[in-house]
Image: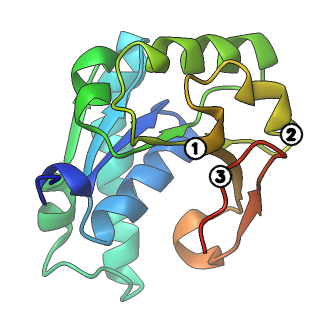
Amino acid sequence: MTDPIESNRVLVIGAGTMGTQIAVQCANHGRLVFLYDNIRAAVEQAPARLERLAQDLAGKGLLHSSSSRDTLRRIELGIDMAVAAVQAVIVIECVPENLELKKSVFEQLGRHCRPETIYVTNTSSLVPSQLAGSCRHPERMAALHFHLPVATSNVVDLMPHPGIRRHR
């Protein structure tokens, strides 16, 4: 049986524009988030960006927590993908639109994630079948294209691929 705390964990890979917006949105909806980036400067800049995003949600009346601090407490930042991947039930990859880079990320994740992990690529120009072969469990991988701004657009395009496992 999965620990309820563990079943609540999301790993967001990439602390740039999309990654931070997705991390705040996940935390705003009660998820525990690990925001990872292998670029130390991105991790160092992320707290200020996360703070602005959470305050923006609060200012628009879109914050589900009692305060932006409560939302931000659910986000942990780091540069160790392995530690976060072992705990994640959902991984959302938000690295630049570079096919080889994205493939590399999914190959790395395959070494650390649990078998039940759901893999998501955030992309607007690649199709998931281009990446599925790099994923340890391609049947558990899809693409999501989040429309900006993530918190207010409420639009996400879901793109499966032929090898995805369909649940009824």
Mark 2 highlights which residue?
127
Marks 1 & 2, CB-CB < 8 Å contact: no
Please tell me whether mark 3 sits on a helix, a strand or a loop: loop
Q: Is disc 3 surrounded by few (<14), some (14 to 19) or many (20+) residues within 10 Å?
A: some
Question: Where is residue 92 shown, x and y percent of the image?
Answer: 51, 42
Q: What's the amino acid at mark 2? A: Val
For residue 36, side relative to residue 67 (left or right): right
Mark sitting earlier along the chain (1/2): 2
Q: Do the residues labelled 3 and 1 touch (CB within 8 Å)?
A: yes
Spot the residue most to the bottom: 61
Q: Name the residue under label 3.
A: 165
Q: In this view, does 59 lie above or below 102?
A: below
For the C terminus, which image quadrant? bottom right
Name which of mark 3 and mark 1 comes first in the sequence. 1
Q: How far apart are marks 3 and 1 (CA)?
A: 6 Å
Q: In 3D space, how far apart are the residues under numbered discs 1 and 2 (Cα atoms)? A: 15 Å
Residue lying at 33% horizontally and 31% vertically, measured from the top left: 114
The answer to whether residue 46 is left or right of residue 65 is right
Q: In which quarter of the image is the N terminus?
A: bottom left
- In whole angstroms, how far apart are the C-alphas of marks 3 and 2? 16 Å
User: Which circle's residue, 3 or 2, is located before the other in the chain?
Assistant: 2
**Of circles 3 and 1, which is in front?**
3
Circles 3 and 2, Cβ within 8 Å, touching? The answer is: no
Q: Quadrant of residue 28?
A: bottom left
